[in-house]
Image (cartoon, grey):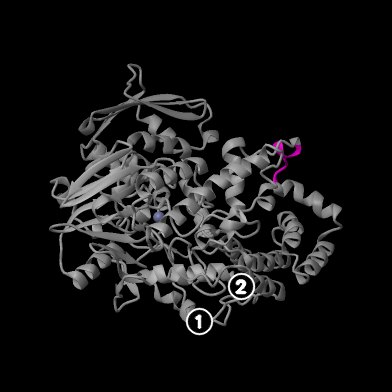
Amino acid sequence: MQVIDAIKTITAGLVFSAGAIAATEHFHPKGNLPSKYTIALQKEQRAKLPFADKKDFEEQERGFIAAPDYREIMADSGHVAWSMGKYDFLLNGEDFDSIHPSLQRQAILNMNYGLYEVTPGIYQIRGYGLANSTFIEGDTGWIVFDVLENKENARAALKFINETLGERPVKAIVYSHSHADHFGGVRGMVDEAEVKSGKVQIIAPKGFMENAVAENIHAGNAMSRRLFYQYGVLLPASPYGHVDQSIGKNVGSGSLGLIPPNRVIEADYEEITIDGITMVFQNTPGTEAPAEMNTWFPDKKAFWAAENITGTIHNIYTLRGAKVRDTLAWSKQINAALYQFGQDAEVMFASHNWPRWGNERIQEVMRGQRDMYAHMNNQVLNLANQGVTINEIHNLYDMPKSLQQQWYARSYHGSLQHNSRAVINRYLGYWDANPTTLTPLSPSDSAPLYVEMMGGSKKILKKSRKLYQRGEYRLAQEILNKLVYAEPSNQEAKDLLADCFEQLGYQYESPSLRNSFLAAALELRDGIKGGNVAHTGGPDLARAMSTELFLEFLGIQMDGRKAEGMAFKVNLLTPDNSETYLIELNNETLTSIKGYQSPDADLSITINRSDLEDLMMRKMTLKQKTAQGLAKLEGDTGVLKQFASTLVEFDTLFEMMPGTK
Ligand SMILES: [Zn+2]
């Protein structure tokens, strides 16, 4: 399931069941309560931040129609696909010192759950997964903007709106962008046959299909592993664990699908009327996703901001791993929307968080978000042009004071710490221009020298404990980290490092940071525990992956060292889509080129693309396909055996912190 393992990283796709935990109890026997330093910091934040500004709460509850009588959704395979109920501890009115007060506020806002009216004829289902699903009432049916991350949640959402507002057929679906929390639930809302027949239109921005899969394949296994940190996949919902995911509560774990769009928006702006609803689409490539689009509803003076404008600073760099995004392009697209649509808009709604009403408020938020991305771009580069490096920028860069007081410009999904480093990385790369860091020793090779020079583990532990007791967690982690690398089996060191991570996790405003620290603490204490990994990547995603991309992934899956001395050429022909590829193994490297065949190939493989998909998903082998007459091999089949011997099974739970495997 290697390819599918890579694909499944598109969604969390992980099932874990944390029992009900009393809010006052730490879920882990080694867990600590917030220290007096952490408590003091949280108090300071409560005094400093504009908690008197309740606009978000008014906007978050405005238009509420009804909530369902359930707080859990079951997956078809029997586990809990989605639970809102496990976060109910956030609603008991308590201030938790183990949660940054600003994050707790966002976590409470993201408890919105059920059906809401945005404006007459536009409704949202919120709290059924990470994203919202938006329903536009056409003359005869629904136009659905974004269909949640899995089939089960999407089906429940459609059922609930139909039960509450009256049954209407789905006439069209719009995928706002190429991330799975916006398309993965499509099979819960529509039948593929209706899309194929043209009865239901699925509309997507240009580049949607390529990017829906491609962003997650090449480094897929590493992304999937890192997701455990960014999303705190194994952290229980608890004031000491997972509390929120900034743009929504969390990711569900039902079955993920993808039906290709039958209408793609190619132009920068394009107007379409469907079922009596006029929509102007604005392609915004290179923003939050490589393929994304906003939508303007001129008759309703309503602006759909996709995921370009949400209730947080978004990720320029997403910690699970992805190519760094473009702050300047993002800001410019928001500016374009502000002048194209924002002057007239009376309501702005998005695929996450909650809407904004009134033109003044809309322009305030659009300008604020435009400026925060541009500020990040400009001021980080201003500092970089004065010699500040990627290793310093996060300690220097801050938002302007005027934006620090705006809740929509706070560091939830994207923290200033990790985003500012990303801006430098985008323009200058990872090197700080100090030759010492150009070819550094690996951490495990340099650590023993540090430990020796610091006088050994006892001395380090003593000093670290002192630093910990003084609340100097970042200093303590600096030396403990060296000790843990030098002595990966030193549990005392790992536990103390975990204690530092835990307090830092409690102190960070951004769930991306909080979860990373708390998840690493959990692994340092317990070692890596797998949890129950549900393989949710389905045949839809294998189908969506081009043969070219599949061959690229095989090249990555191949351990070059095992291919020493091997050399072959293979012609691949997939008759049902008339594609040809020439695949070469040379210099321990697999390459392929589309549209070519070699007359002196060692082997020619003829197999329909639809049968190749079974191989991609490892449902069948090439041998079985050949035996069934569904594949034809001509030439030296020995090269396949050779090649198979080079392939690596990636460990989906590889070690990230030393001594945790
Ligand atoms: Zn999203």
Quadrant of the rendered image holding ligand 1: bottom left
Neighbour tally class for label 1: few under 14, some 14-19, many 20 plus, Cα within 10 Å: few
Q: Is residue 555 left or right of residue 209?
A: right
Instruction: Determine the residue positioned at 19% across, 47% down.
Output: 273
Can residue 217 be seen in this snapshot? no
Instruction: Determine the residue positioned at 29% across, 76% down.
Output: 68
The residue lying toward the viewer, choosing from 516 and 331, is 331
Q: Percent from the top left, x then y, of residue 231?
A: 50, 60
Instruction: Determine the residue positioned at 48% across, 71% down.
Output: 54
- Answer whether residue 440 is magenta in the image: yes
Disc number lying in front (2 or 1): 2
Neighbour tally class for label 2: few under 14, some 14-19, many 20 plus, Cα within 10 Å: some
The amino acid at mark 1 is Gly
The residue lying toward the viewer, choosing from 283 and 160, is 283
Q: Is mark 2 within 8 Å of ligand 1?
A: no
Task: Tell me the element at label 1.
Answer: loop
Task: Tell me the element at label 2.
Answer: helix
The amino acid at mark 2 is Arg
Can residue 146 be seen in this snapshot? yes
What residue is pinned by disc 2? Answer: 46
Q: Quadrant of the C terminus?
A: bottom right
The residue lying toward the viewer, choosing from 481 and 327, is 327
| Sequence order check, earlier mark of 2 and 1 | 2
Q: Percent from the top left, x then y, of residue 266?
A: 29, 36
- Answer whether residue 210 is magenta in the image: no
Check the image and name the residue furthest to the top: 599
- The quarter holding residue 464 reads bottom right
What residue is pinned by disc 1? Answer: 93
Q: Is residue 121 left or right of residue 23?
A: left
Magenta-colored span: 436-442
